[in-house]
Image: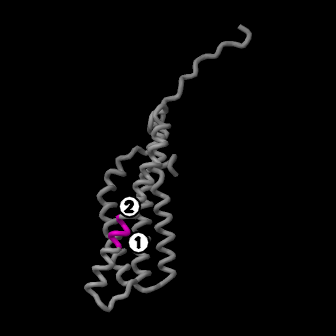
Amino acid sequence: MLDQAGPRKQVSLGIALLAAGLVFLAFGYQGQNLWLILIGTILGGAGFSFTNPVSMAALSATPLVQRGMLAGVLPLASNFGTALSVALLTAGMCALMSRYLGSNPGATEAAALSSALSILAWITLVATLVTLPVALKLPKSTSDQTAPQAQAGPTPAAGK
């Protein structure tokens, strides 16, 4: 898919699947429905995996002499970003849930989690709308950006 259409479609599909997963999770926790929670988890995981082509597109668009350095920096940046986002997400979810439970004394934790996931789904939707114009400007194919191939000239005959 990346070679045929470039990273735009995969990243857009990934963000849409992440948002859909959050919506299913929000309704699943509110209704305490295990099937909705399972569908939301699967959609979110699939969406996360569709956002990975960005790294491959960046690596293939980099000149050959710098690819080794970038191949080392990308996992570092990715792991740092993942750890930071999980920490911020956990802190935000705890803050939203405690605020919801504090203002609604009879509420359950599932209702608080549903409320927090609904807010996160809206944030994801806004982030998608903000970043979509940038995604549409990405190059269509990563093969157009690779280092130019050496021109093959006439080869000398074996016996001369």
Q: Earlier in the sequence, mark 2 or mark 1?
A: 1
In which quadrant is the C terminus drawn? top right
Residue 53 position, x and y percent, is: 47, 51
Check the image and report above or below for 138 versus 36.
above
Q: Is residue 2 left or right of residue 92?
A: right
Where residue 22 is drawn, which disc sits there? 1
What residue lies at 44% left-to-right and 50% top-to-bottom? 54
In three-dimensional space, the C-alpha distance between marks 2 and 1, rounded to whole angstroms, equals 15 Å
Check the image and report above or below for 59 versus 46.
above
Question: How dense is the environment of label 1, judged by Cα within 10 Å: few (below 14), some, or many (20 and up)?
Answer: many
What residue lies at 35% left-to-right and 73% top-to-bottom? 93
In this rendering, does residue 25 appear at all? yes
Quadrant of res 13: bottom left
In this rendering, does residue 6 appear at all? no
Q: Is residue 30 left or right of residue 147?
A: left
Q: Which residue lies under the disc numbered 2? A: 85
Q: Is residue 133 magenta?
A: no
In this view, the residue in front, 87 or 5, is 87
What residue lies at 44% left-to-right and 39% top-to-bottom? 61
The magenta segment is 88-93
Check the image and report above or below for 143 versus 94.
above
